[in-house]
């Protein structure tokens, strides 16, 4: 297991070189090798969704993908959402609607919802709720997350 | 214009939303990793621990001079037990630490941990309250015969006479399954050593940093000054992160012993099997009711499974004694008799979890009320209305004093909002179509913001309670408040900045609140028991008032006015009645940079320190739920959920409602979904989130929150705590609603969670008994 591989990960438009064991998860590579610790690990068995990132635009559990599988693909993480201090519409909506408390699950929800709103801007309330049920939050009771994502959807539709 | 009372968005958000928060695992990058080898056996004798050659593996014999963890309660009916840092001769629950592996990376440490051979002679495990209390049962600890660690009793004078006046005696037995607080961020600690001084900084995901420093220093036999504990961003806690645990002892020990930086980051499986559980309780209740459906006497026999050890610092008494002292809830009752026992078993130890025993107590008393209402032929609302406490202050049968609340008003409001008459009509129509609809209520109060007077009465070895705030204004007019409380995601810093801003006439953005660093903050007790807003908020108000006096004196000197004429508002110090004004920042700068002007007035610093240690205040609420039960699957859909809440003055209504939403979601989980399940050998069958069912966005309904405001003088900000309330009332409201829905079938549930399987079992049994 110790034979390491040299890979380059493209994260938020920037290349990161890393030397990883084949068993290294994408989440661990992002956190430990790229220093992008905004991607959080909540369960490491693919249920909670805290580690959700976008790979070629699709929400992916970064704890269930190997880093080597992500080579050559466009990865987006929470660190890539804001433009400097300017929050994305979805981040701003989370702030305005109190869509986060401890903030541990938040990066996963932001990436999940960013992925779905970009792919399906006119998603219905019902379908949106179904998508948001992919991830777990322990603080908010989901109310304000749902409100925030709906508000961002309206704003992104213009 | 007041900042208090406004739904101000949180200052905490901006880092968290951009992925720039700093959680413990983030602080651990680059450190060596510690992986714990845990017992796969619930009860047994350790024969040998065999590490692979060449590996760094710590076992009990390495920890010479390290003391076990011992939680103390100064009561004759409490037996202290020692919790070892690493099991030496015996293991007492699955998941107990037996050895610790240190390696440069997590992967290497995990590989080595897999190769550590444990030879443990398994013995029959004691799983569950029933097994522990059986005549002749084996013991979990040699010094605890009968497995009862704590037994408390209360009996009011003339109890039997009181019960004898009852026209109708209702007996029920309720059970609560085991739950995990399941914070999204599991626990973890990262110890960094300063090689020059030998001083260790432990960054860890905790709610009580100062207490942890003391506990670690005591166990490790080191000077407290040689240890700094930092709670960075904490990803939820809900009570699970209050305790001193062996893992933190091990990381600090390893950092000092090996002279390296080392971290332990708990994974979800560890958290589920060894990260503290809660709520595993069985109560038997007898309620005596008179001809007017008034409760005249209540008798309770309460058993709390406290697991293998009593958790430090609060002890297992936290569940047992709270249940004993506060079982009658918000109901007026003079004859009370109770026995409450803490029972030790070969299972994961218990720690407080949002509400501690209150969700179970409320479930018990509210099921009793509904059962009595059905038996006596009156409505669930009416029986509550007749029995709720109406006059304040009120002294309970166990001697607890309730300050003013709105118990009946909250019930009345909930009845109106839910439109009970219209619902009953709809319910009858639905029954006609074979559908099962039900409504449930739960009225409760929540003891919040209690300081040392309450904890002293519990005779804990460590009396928790006060909070201190150190406040300073710098020469630029910005305020720093260093608090002993330690938030873990609630938004406390934003709310405190609103309290401080109002006193000092500055904007909340001009206030920086510092928490969770024992080098930077005064000794305090952290966050638990719905206390932070009341106690830390009160201390902030007092300190800000102290600072306000100094500011007024300095401004008076600059404006050539009297200090009592000065008001601080909108960033200015001005003379009352539209007189001269000076910017607060200018006053602050003058105090530091032109100190000669104020020499005879006060020292050259704008600082103030205050401590607040209140006796506590009770918030209250009524929760109401409408549910539909699917007869064929046992699934429950919550159609509507509302809370009428009275937490006094709301400092930040947005944050308050967020707390209620989250608490209610956890309460719904408690009512319908979440349960830690052990097999007979003490293995956990629910060690993943695929088995331990935390609800998602599709299970939690939209929650309606309505506020009442009773002004109390028991809290100097007027705020009452509400952090736990959501979790306290929701299980009873939801299960009462389920039982109302099932009432046409003649069945009811007295168990939480009331899962689909349990509902189906009740329905099957009812159908089988119909000829």
Image (cartoon, grey):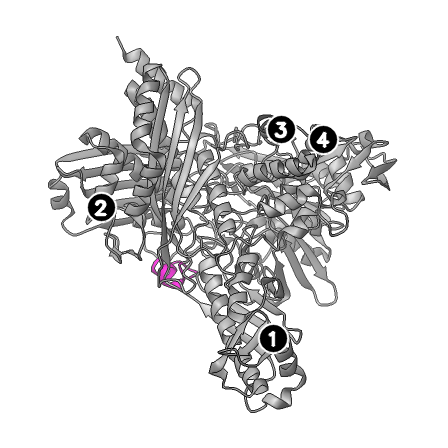
Query: Residue B112 at x, y = what percent?
Result: 71, 38
Q: Residue at label 2?
A: B337
Tag 1 secondary structure = helix
Q: Which residue is mark 1?
A: B584
What distance separates the C-alpha of mark 4 from that of mark 1? 51 Å
Give the residue number, with chain letter if any, for mark 4. A60
Residue holding disc 3: A131
- Using the image, name the chain to which the residue with label 1 belongs: B
Q: CA distance from mark 2 to mark 3?
A: 51 Å
Q: Nearer the viewer, residue A99 or A29?
A: A99
Same-chain check, marks 1 and 3: no
Q: Which residues are magenta?
A: B450-463
Front residue of this view, candidates B762 and B385: B385
Number of numbered discs = 4
Q: Between marks 4 and 3, how big is the CA–CA gap?
A: 13 Å
Pinpoint the chain carrying mark 3: A
Residue occupying image coordinates x 50% and y 71%: B543
In terms of image quadrants, where is residue A150?
Answer: top right
The reply to the same-chain question for discs 4 and 3 is yes
SS for callout 2: strand
Q: Residues within 10 Å of mark 1 (few under 14, many from 20)?
A: many
Nearest to viewer (mark 4 / mark 1): 1
Q: Are marks 1 and 3 in contact (CB under 8 Å)?
A: no
Query: In the rendered structure, the residue with mark 4 lies on which chain?
Result: A
């Amino acid at each position: 297991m110790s034979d390491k591989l040299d890979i380059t990960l493209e994260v938020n438009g920037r290349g990161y070189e890393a030397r990883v064991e084949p068993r290294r998860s994408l989440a661990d590579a992002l956190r430990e090798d790229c220093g992008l610790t905004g991607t959080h690990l909540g369960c490491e068995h693919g249920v909670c969704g805290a580690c959700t990132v976008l790979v070629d635009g699709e929400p992916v559990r970064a704890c269930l993908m190997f880093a080597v599988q992500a080579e050559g693909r466009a990865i987006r993480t929470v660190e890539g959402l804001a433009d400097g201090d300017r929050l994305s519409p979805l981040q701003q909506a989370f702030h305005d609607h109190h869509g986060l408390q401890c903030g541990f699950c938040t990066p996963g929800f932001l990436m999940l919802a960013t992925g779905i709103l970009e792919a399906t801007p006119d998603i219905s309330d019902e379908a949106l709720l179904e998508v948001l049920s992919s991830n777990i939050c322990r603080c908010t009771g989901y109310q304000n997350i749902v409100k925030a994502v709906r508000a961002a959807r309206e704003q992104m539709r213009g | 214009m007041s900042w208090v009372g406004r739904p101000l968005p949180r200052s905490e958000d901006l880092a968290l939303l951009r992925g720039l928060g700093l959680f413990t695992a983030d602080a651990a990058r680059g450190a060596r990793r510690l992986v714990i080898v845990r017992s796969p056996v619930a009860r047994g004798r350790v024969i040998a621990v065999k590490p692979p050659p060449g590996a760094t593996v710590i076992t009990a014999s390495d920890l010479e001079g390290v003391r076990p963890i011992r939680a103390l309660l100064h009561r004759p009916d409490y037996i202290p037990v020692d919790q070892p840092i690493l099991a030496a001769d015996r293991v007492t629950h699955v998941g107990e630490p037996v050895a610790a592996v240190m390696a440069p990376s997590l992967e290497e440490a995990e590989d080595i941990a897999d190769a550590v051979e444990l030879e443990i002679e398994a013995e029959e495990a004691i799983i569950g309250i029933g097994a522990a209390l059986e005549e002749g049962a084996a013991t979990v600890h040699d010094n605890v015969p009968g497995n009862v660690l704590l037994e408390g009793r209360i009996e009011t004078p003339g109890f039997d006479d009181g019960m004898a006046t009852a026209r109708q005696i209702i007996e029920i037995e309720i059970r609560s399954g085991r739950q995990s607080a399941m914070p999204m961020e599991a626990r973890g600690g990262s110890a960094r050593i300063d090689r020059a001084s030998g001083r260790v900084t432990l960054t860890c995901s905790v709610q009580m940093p100062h207490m942890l420093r003391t506990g670690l220093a005591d166990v490790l036999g080191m000077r407290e000054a040689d240890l700094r504990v930092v709670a960075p961003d904490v990803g939820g806690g809900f009570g699970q992160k209050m305790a001193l645990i062996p893992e933190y002892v091990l990381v600090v020990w390893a950092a000092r012993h090996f002279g390296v930086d080392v971290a332990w980051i708990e994974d979800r499986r560890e958290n589920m099997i060894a990260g503290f559980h809660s709520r595993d309780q069985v109560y038997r209740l007898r309620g005596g009711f008179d001809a007017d459906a008034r409760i005249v006497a209540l008798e309770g026999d309460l058993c709390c499974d406290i697991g293998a050890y009593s958790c430090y610092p609060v002890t297992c008494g936290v569940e047992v004694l709270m249940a004993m002292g506060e079982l009658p809830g918000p109901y007026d009752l003079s004859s009370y008799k109770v026995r409450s026992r803490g029972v030790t078993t070969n299972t994961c130890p218990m720690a407080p979890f949002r509400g501690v025993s209150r969700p179970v107590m409320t479930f018990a008393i509210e099921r009793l009320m509904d059962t009595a209402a059905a038996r006596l032929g009156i409505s669930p609302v009416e029986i509550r209305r007749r029995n709720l406490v109406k006059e304040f202050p009120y002294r309970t049968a166990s001697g607890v004093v309730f300050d003013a609340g709105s118990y009946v008003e909250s019930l009345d409001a909930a009845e109106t909002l839910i439109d009970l008459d219209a619902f009953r009509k709809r319910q009858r129509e639905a029954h006609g179509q074979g559908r099962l609809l039900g409504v449930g209520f739960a009225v409760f109060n929540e003891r919040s913001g209690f300081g040392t007077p309450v904890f002293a009465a519990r005779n804990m070895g460590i009396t928790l309670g006060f909070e201190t705030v150190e406040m300073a204004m710098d020469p630029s007019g910005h305020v720093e408040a260093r608090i002993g409380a330690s938030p873990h995601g609630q938004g406390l810093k934003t709310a405190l900045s609103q309290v401080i801003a109002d006193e000092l006439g500055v904007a909340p953005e001009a206030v920086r609140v510092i928490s969770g660093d024992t080098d930077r903050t005064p000794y305090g007790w952290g966050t638990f028991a719905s206390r932070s807003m009341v106690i830390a908020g009160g201390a902030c108000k007092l300190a800000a008032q102290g600072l306000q006096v100094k500011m007024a004196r300095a401004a008076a000197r600059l404006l050539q006015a009297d200090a009592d004429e000065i008001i601080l508002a909108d960033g200015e110090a001005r003379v009352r009645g539209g007189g001269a004004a000076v910017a607060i920042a200018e006053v602050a700068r003058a105090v530091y940079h032109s100190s000669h002007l104020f020499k005879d007035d006060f020292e050259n610093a704008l600082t103030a320190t205050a401590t607040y240690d209140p006796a506590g205040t009770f918030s209250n609420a009524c929760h109401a739920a409408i549910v539909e039960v699917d007869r064929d699957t046992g699934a429950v859909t919550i159609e509507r959920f509302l809370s009428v809440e009275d937490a006094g003055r709301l400092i930040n209504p947005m944050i308050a409602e967020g707390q209620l939403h989250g608490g209610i979601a956890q309460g719904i989980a408690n009512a319908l979904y979440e349960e830690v399940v052990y097999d007979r050998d003490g293995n956990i069958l629910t060690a993943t989130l695929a088995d331990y069912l935390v609800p998602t966005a599709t299970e939690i309904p939209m929650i309606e929150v309505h506020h009442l405001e009773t002004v109390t003088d028991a809290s100097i900000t007027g705020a009452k705590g509400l952090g736990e309330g959501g979790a306290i009332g929701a299980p009873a409201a939801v299960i009462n609603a389920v039982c109302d829905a099932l009432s046409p079938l003649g069945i009811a549930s007295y168990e939480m969670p009331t899962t689909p399987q349990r509902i189906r079992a009740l329905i099957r049994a009812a159908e089988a008994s119909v000829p």
